[in-house]
Amino acid sequence: MQVSMRELKSHLARYIKQARMGQALEITSHRKVVARLSGVPSSEDSAMSRLLASGAANWQGGKPVGAALKLMAKGTPVSQIVLDDRG
């Protein structure tokens, strides 16, 4: 659905309600599409929620723990390579 910027400003609440219900809106200025307005999907539909519900993933409520990977410095630092390349 296309709606002019003027119409959008005049009836913003109506168009926000339509976007919430899933209607995608194209906002026009001088008959050219300049933006699109769409609703935000509910968090219940997220992929993470589906994984948790199916049991494929679990979460204890805490922050995620980082990987035990520790990077070791080997060779020439990138900053030195850049400086050498600049001459």
Image: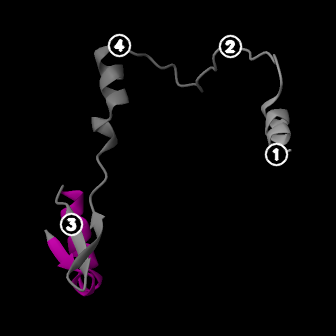
Pick whichever of labels 1 and 3 is earlier in the sequence. Answer: 3
Pick whichever of labels 2 and 4 is earlier in the sequence. Answer: 4
Q: Amino acid at mark 3?
A: Leu
Depth-wise, is mark 1 or mark 4 nearer the camera? 1
Q: CA distance from mark 1 to mark 3?
A: 50 Å
Instruction: Give the answer, above or below, for where 29 lies relative to 1.
Output: below
According to the picture, the residue beneath numbered tag 2 turns out to be 69
**Left or right: residue 50 compared with residue 79:** left
The kind of secondary structure element at disc 1 is: helix
Which residue lies at the image location 47% right of the left edge and 20% below the top edge?
59
**Left or right: residue 81 compared with residue 13:** right
Circles 1 and 3: CB atoms closer than 8 Å: no
Q: CA distance from mark 3 to mark 2?
A: 46 Å
Circles 1 and 4: CB atoms closer than 8 Å: no
| Residue 13: in magenta span | yes
Pick whichever of labels 4 and 3 is earlier in the sequence. Answer: 3
Q: Choose top left, top right, bottom left or bottom right for residue 73.
A: top right
Residue 83 in picture, x, y percent from top left: 85, 41
